[in-house]
Image (spheres, rainbow, N blue to C red):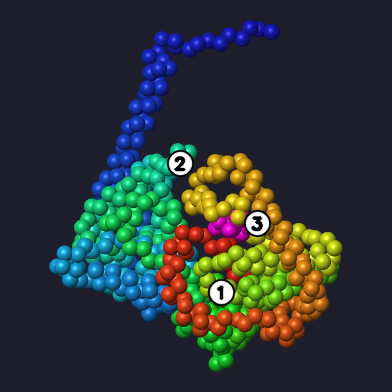
């Protein structure tokens, strides 16, 4: 083989010396970067809209003269307490002198706290509509970009534009995207986000209260926000917006039914009763879906059954009539759901059953039992125990009637595991562990448990004991009511859907006096006030969703 010689080319050439060529590359890149950043951060920006040179511009959507906000408080149903607060802020905007004359400082911002779809954006928009001022809307995630410095630059730009348009309202949705607590955890810290947050704080401090700018922000995770954001002079007002109760839902239905041609017999109150746990956005969705369903059927008005279908659809995804389930499977599902239903019926503190069905929906549930949750914020041990038993009812029933268990209860088991761990480690409901709460809202301590290994063992043991106890109790109950489970299951197999009234006709009234809605309503506001702390600090005993989906 001929020898291959590798020759080093142009050893003496200045430009290809490795040191020099690296240097040149660095200089070129730095130059490019400086050029870019100048364009990005520069006052005028440059380039066409959406181009790379606009990257530092805020992406706020502006509703102004031409596209005036036409939404008013009349479009926002329920949320009465929140509306009062917000109206006051509108007054600050309109008559700042009235407040400053007496030496008062006008708040600069308010934080709207609540789950998604409850009308936070709507309320902010209505505020702008009422005040007749421009409205800047953007999402916290709009600030976040791959490039360093862009977020801060966008914040700067947003406030600059806002100052030109004052009086105006700035609305930042999902503020937690930028407002998360800074650098508590070195691994998860994020310089770019921190810079953005710092810039926001600087801007908020930078204008006086009477500058005519009000900043509203929305989040459903107030617990993860950096405390600096909540200090006086920033978002010092917090307005909490909850999912609507039955009265609120009725009001929201009325708003969204306005443009829809409904039949004379439509019972709006009933609709509200059948949609516990729905947020405003879900209700808007139901109304629209019902109209589409009725149109598809060629009706000239939307009636109750269309709404029923729409509600089912929203709850469980699209109905899958032709999903093939073997008769044996169907039987298991029926007994599983009947088990849940019977537990709900005979356990005093369980939620009263609303409806149980074995019609498969979407990809998730093969059947489900739906309950009416009470509007409740505090739960005692008995109540949580009953909830756990009710959730175990499906598996226990399978066990009793078929002598074997299926994978169908996995979702149920996830829920009760979560609940049981919460009882032991968050709510201090276990004698052995004691009155200790390891609740960590930021969940930053994923890797280090806040308790010793020994305590960990005790916790696991106690959770196991609790669940076993609940399971034994559930089985005892279902064995005692075996005939009733059978009746419901058989009926489910033929009818597929059973409502509360059907169940009542089959097995008799629920043995517990149901608290009249009025009583609940009366105590409601008072209680809410008193328990505020408990509500915002704790997590609900379990995801307070309305359905207990099962048989995944
Ligand atoms: P959020 O900002 O809290 O996630 P949105 O304000 O975007 O929720 O609400 C989405 C939609 O849901 C609204 O556009 C409206 O149609 C409907 N909606 C929510 N809450 C209400 C309410 N209280 N009254 C009337 N409609 C509502
Ligand atoms: Zn189940």
How far apart marks 2 and 3 lie (CA) works out to: 28 Å
Q: Earlier in the sequence, mark 1 or mark 2?
A: 2
Q: Residue at x 35, y 48 (%)?
A: 197
Task: Say which quarter of the image contains residue 394.
Answer: bottom right
User: Residue at label 1?
Assistant: 374
Q: Secondary structure at mark 2?
A: loop
Q: Is residue 348 left or right of residue 159?
A: right
Q: Residue at x 27, y 65 (%)?
A: 168
Q: Secondary structure at mark 1?
A: loop
Q: Position of residue 147 (x, y in %)?
A: 40, 42
- 218 or 34, which lies in front? 218
User: Residue at label 3?
Assistant: 417
Q: Earlier in the sequence, mark 1 or mark 3?
A: 1
Q: Residue at x 56, y 11 (%)?
A: 6
User: Residue at label 2?
Assistant: 185
- In the picture, the disc for residue 412 is none
- Between label 2 and label 3, give the one nearer the viewer: 3
For ligand 2, tell me if the residue under mark 1 lies within 8 Å: no
Q: Secondary structure at mark 3?
A: helix
Q: Does 116 appear above or below 4?
A: below
For ligand 2, tell me if the residue under mark 3 lies within 8 Å: no
- 212 or 506, which lies in front? 506
For ligand 1, tell me if the residue under mark 2 lies within 8 Å: no
How far apart marks 1 and 3 lie (CA) works out to: 22 Å
Question: On the rendered image, what quadrant is the C terminus found in?
Answer: bottom right
Q: Position of residue 279 (x, y in %)?
A: 51, 71
Q: Is residue 101 left or right of residue 463?
A: left
User: Magenta residues?
Assistant: 418-430
Task: Say which quarter of the image contains residue 302.
Answer: bottom right
């Amino acid at each position: 083989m001929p020898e291959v010689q590798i020759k080093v080319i142009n050893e003496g050439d200045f430009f290809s010396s490795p040191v020099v060529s690296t240097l040149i590359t660095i200089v070129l890149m730095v130059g490019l970067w400086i050029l870019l950043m100048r364009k990005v951060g520069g006052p005028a920006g440059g380039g066409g809209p959406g181009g790379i040179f606009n990257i530092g511009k805020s992406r706020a959507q502006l509703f102004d003269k031409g596209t005036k906000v036409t939404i008013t408080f009349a479009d926002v149903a329920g949320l009465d307490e929140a509306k009062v607060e917000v109206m006051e802020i509108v007054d600050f905007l309109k008559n700042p002198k009235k407040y400053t004359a007496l030496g008062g400082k006008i708040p600069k911002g308010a934080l709207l706290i609540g789950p998604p779809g409850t009308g936070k954006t709507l309320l902010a928009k209505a505020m702008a509509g009422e005040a007749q001022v421009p409205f800047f809307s953007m999402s916290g995630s709009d600030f976040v970009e791959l490039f360093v410095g862009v977020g801060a630059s966008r914040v700067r730009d947003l406030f600059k534009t806002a100052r030109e348009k004052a009086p105006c309202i700035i609305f930042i949705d999902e503020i937690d995207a930028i407002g998360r607590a800074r650098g508590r955890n070195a691994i998860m810290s994020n310089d770019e986000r921190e810079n953005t947050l710092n810039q926001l704080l600087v801007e908020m401090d930078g204008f006086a209260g009477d500058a005519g700018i009000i900043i509203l922000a929305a989040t459903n995770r107030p617990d993860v926000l950096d405390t600096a954001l909540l200090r006086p002079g920033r978002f010092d007002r917090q307005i909490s917006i909850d999912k609507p109760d039955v009265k609120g839902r009725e009001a929201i239905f009325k708003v969204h039914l306005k443009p829809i041609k409904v039949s004379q017999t439509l019972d709006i109150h009933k609709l509200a009763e059948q949609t516990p746990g729905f947020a405003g956005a879900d209700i808007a969705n139901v109304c629209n879906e019902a109209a589409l369903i009725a149109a598809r059927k060629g009706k000239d008005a939307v009636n109750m059954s269309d709404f029923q279908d729409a509600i089912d659809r929203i709850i469980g995804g699209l109905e899958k009539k032709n999903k093939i389930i073997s008769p044996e499977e169907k039987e298991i599902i029926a007994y599983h759901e009947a088990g849940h239903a019977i537990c709900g019926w005979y356990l005093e503190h369980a939620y009263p059953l609303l409806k149980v069905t074995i019609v498969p929906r979407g990809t998730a549930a093969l059947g489900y039992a739906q309950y009416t949750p009470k509007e409740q914020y505090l739960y005692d041990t008995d109540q949580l125990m009953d909830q756990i038993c009710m959730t175990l009812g499906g598996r226990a029933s399978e066990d009793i009637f078929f002598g074997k268990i299926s994978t169908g209860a996995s979702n149920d088991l996830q829920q009760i595991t979560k609940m049981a761990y919460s009882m032991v480690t968050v709510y201090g409901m276990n004698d052995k562990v004691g009155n200790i709460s390891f609740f960590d809202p930021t969940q930053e301590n994923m890797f280090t448990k806040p308790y010793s290994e020994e305590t960990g063992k005790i916790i696991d043991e106690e959770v196991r004991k609790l669940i076993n106890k609940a399971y034994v109790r559930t089985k005892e109950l279902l064995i005692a009511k075996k005939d009733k489970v059978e009746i419901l299951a058989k009926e489910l197999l033929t009818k597929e859907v059973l409502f509360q009234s059907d169940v009542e006709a089959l097995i008799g009234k629920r043995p517990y006096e149901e608290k009249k809605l009025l009583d609940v309503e009366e105590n409601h506001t008072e209680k809410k006030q008193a328990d505020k702390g408990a509500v915002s600090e704790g997590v609900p005993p379990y995801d307070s969703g309305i359905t207990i989906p099962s048989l995944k």
